[in-house]
Each structure stands twice: as C-alpha cells, then as structure tokens.
Image: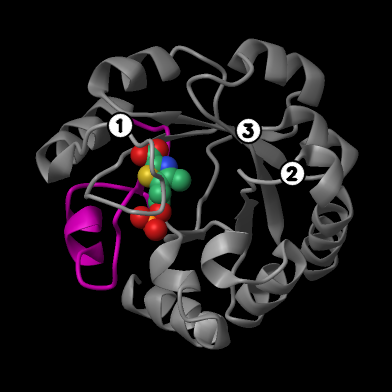
Amino acid sequence: MTLKLPKIYPITDREISGLSHTEQVRRLIAGGATLIQLREKRQQAGDWFNDALTAARICREAGVLCIVNDLVDMAIAIGADGVHLGQDDMHVAAARRLLGCGKIIGLSTHSIEQLEAALREEIDYAAIGPIFATSTKSDHEPVIGLKTLLNAAQTSGNVPLVAIGGLTAENLPAIFEAGASSAAMIGAILSDPERIAVIYRKLGQNAL
Ligand code: 3NM
C-alpha cells in the first residue's frame, strides 16, 4: 500500500535545536507532527539509545510514526516504525529482511540515476536532495535544483517523493508545485527551539 506522508516531514537535530531527541519529539508532536525522523550524526549509538527509546515511546503513545536515520539496528531496538537509509547505509534488501514488510523504508538519493535505482528496491518512499544549498549537512552532494526535482517527481510515479535540503517557508510552494509529496526540513523548524511547535504547525497549515 502506498504510504501517505505528511506534507512537512520533520527531522530531529540535537546540534541545531540544542535539545534532546525526546524534547524535540515532544515539541513537534505539540505542533501536530504525525511522522518524525530521529537523526543523530554525532553521538555513538550507545550514547543516544535511551534518548531514542524514550522519543520512540512518546511517538508510539501519540500515534506518531517514528523513523530512524541510517541505523536499522537502532530502529529495531527502539521499536520504531522504520528507517531512512542513505546511499552508504545497509542495502535496502538487507534492511527489509531485518525489518519485515510492515515497516517503512525510505532511501536518500541525489540524482535521477540514484532515484531510478532506488525505485527498483522495496522502498516505501524516496528522498531527493539537496534541492537548495544547506549548511545543515556539511558533506552534502551537489545542489540539484527545482528542475531536477520536477524530473524526479515525474520519474517516481506512485512512490512518494520527499524533497530535502535548504527548504524554507518561502520556497515550499515551489517544491510542491514541482510535484514533491513531502518536504523534509531541519533548520527551518528547529533553529528557533522555543517556537518549534508553532513553526511546525504554521508550515503544515500553509502547505495544505
Ligand atoms: N540530507 P535543512 S540535505 C539531512 O540531500 C539532509 O540528502 C540531505 O537540512 C540530502 O532542512 C540535508 O536544514 C539537510 O536544509 C537538510
């Protein structure tokens, strides 16, 4: 069955928000989030396990889908709803065998060629980016722009396509016009931590 993604796909970041994953999840849920990705690039898995476990429990209790970035073992350990894999992470087929067919698998791509390859795998959604320049991911691939996003949206057919990278309230309309199903955002939601709930809610309302 095709996964129905929210228009705004929030991703946690401890560095940008200055908050634990648990606290970010609380604030995003207060803002109406229905799916949240936990993304931790700095800490060792052992160091953020308890934080991730609590964040996942809060999501579950609120009926919010919880996706773990990169780490299939962490996703299983905390009872998450799925994983978001990068090009250098575990192969989709291996992740599917570990997770089973009831879990969500998303895959990052950075070109039409990678997207075409991703669509041959057992994924629930594909992501493509960075659409615009971003300082959130220091080692990001070259910016692809709106034209490639448009091409990607046509290529992805029924598979939901998440746009990511440099997205803001201002450029969101163009993202959806190009055909993205969902907009993944970090900095635009988290950089004013006291207003995470308000910002998420506003972005979601404007994206309808
Ligand atoms: N992945 P912001 S760009 C995590 O291109 C991530 O795959 C990207 O953060 C990709 O919304 C990116 O602050 C950073 O630009 C997104």
**First in sequence: mark 1 or mark 3?**
3
* Residue drawn at point x = 87 percent, y = 53 percent: 53
Q: Is residue 161 visible?
A: no
Q: Quadrant of the C terminus?
A: bottom left
Q: CA distance from mark 1 to mark 2?
A: 27 Å
Please say whether residue 178 is one of the residues in the magenta stretch.
yes
Give the residue at mark 2. 81
Secondary structure found at label 3: loop
Pick the quarter of the image with the N terminus: top right
Under circle 1, the secondary element is loop
As rendered, which of 124 and 22 lies closer to the eye? 22
Question: Mark on residue 103?
Answer: none
Q: Is residue 33 left or right of residue 23?
A: left
Indicate the amino acid at tag 2: Asp
Q: Which mark is residue 141?
A: 1
Query: Could you say where residue 28 lies in the image, as x and y percent from the top left?
Result: 61, 73
Tell me if 199 is positioned left or right of 102 in this view: left
